[in-house]
Image: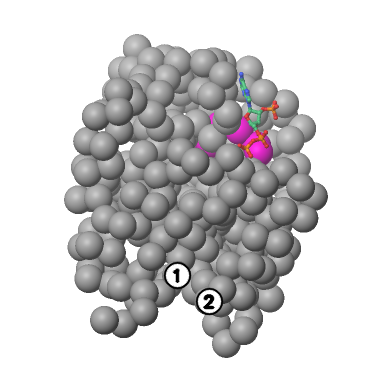
Amino acid sequence: MPTPARYAVIGHPIAHSLSPFIHALFAAQTGECITYEALDGGAAVDGFERVLAGFWAAGGCGANVTLPFKLRALQCADEASAEARAAGAANALRLVDGRVEAHNFDGLGLVRDLAAHGGALAGARVLLLGAGGAARGALLPLVQAGAARIVVANRTALRAQQLVQELAAHLPASVQLAACALDELPAAGAFEVVVNATSASLGGAAPAVPAAAFAPQTLAYDMVYGKGLTPFLALARAAGARCADGLGMLVEQAAASFAWWRGVQPDAAAARAQVQRHLKQQGIECL
Ligand code: ATR
């Protein structure tokens, strides 16, 4: 029996992370011999760095990193992918010949899950709501997936403008990028895909998106999961849009991390169905 390769997710808090469950499903699917644990980075100033250093010293091969450490995960890396640099944050690390490599698969997870819900991005008009870390991480992958026009709309317009200005230099000229305030959206018409990358759903609120942003075939996507029909999704559904929550994005970014570490692509759709059953058994609301 070979010694299992060690993987982990580091965050704070971390007790309720679904990542160990998801990676155990992937390991069972693929027959890869790994362990995957949840490590708490704690609240100390250098807690994350200490936990990560201890993990590498104990033979760790790769780690996912979640809130609030994604920025620091990028800072501690020796090399970073274009996606991690554009996001200004990393959610996956691996140790290769003593060097730490950083990647960010959140945006790829989003793009793959949009595709799984029939949200074709090639040539699409996309509305991205929010201008924080979640929106930043989504921009480059949305462009790479072929979106023709992306409007970044935020409650505070200045933050949307700053985000677009900062990233425009790194994006191909083929994409039309615009930034605006939420209350300027009625002039922008309807979108094929609307992604809620704000943290409004966590507080039981919806960003003030006009009904005109949605057409009957629009896919409305909330990055949060386990909250049922969020106020944003309820608003989108009332305007006739199709709805999806962020559970698939979580599973898809995990699948991309697993493939990056192990060189084997797991079955994300099968794992997603199992994770959904697992959540429902715990009384957690899923779409
Ligand atoms: P994250 O890294 O998770 O994106 P963040 O950097 O705190 O978190 O950003 C939160 C985002 O959600 C911001 O775009 C914020 O808008 P502001 O920049 O105007 O603060 C947005 N947000 C949070 N609550 C919101 C609400 N109730 N309505 C609209 N936007 C909201």
Mark 2 Cα-neighbour bin, 10 Å: few <14, some 14–19, many ≥20: few
Position of the C terminus by quadrant: top left
- Image coordinates of residue 284 in percent, x first then y, are 33, 25
Tell whether label 2 touches label 1 (CB within 8 Å).
yes
Amino acid identity at mark 2: Gly
Element type where label 1 sits in the image = strand
Task: State the image quarter where residue 212 is shown.
Answer: top left
Tag 2 residue: 59
First-in-chain label (1 vs 2) = 1
Task: State the image quarter where residue 130 is shown.
Answer: top right
Q: Nearer the viewer, residue 55 or 130?
A: 55
Q: Answer above or below: position of 90 versus 66.
A: below
Q: Residue furthest bottom?
A: 97
**From the viewer's perspective, is 134 left or right of 215?**
right
Q: Answer above or below: position of 97 versus 252.
A: below
Position of the N terminus by quadrant: bottom left
Q: Ligand 1 near label 1 (Cβ, under 8 Å)?
A: no
Q: For the magenta stretch, what is the residue range?
A: 127-132
Q: Residue furthest front?
A: 1
Amino acid identity at mark 1: Arg
Q: Residue at x 49, y 41 (%)?
A: 15
Q: Residue furthest right?
A: 45
Q: Residue furthest top?
A: 238
Gap in angstroms between the C-alphas marked 1 and 2:
7 Å
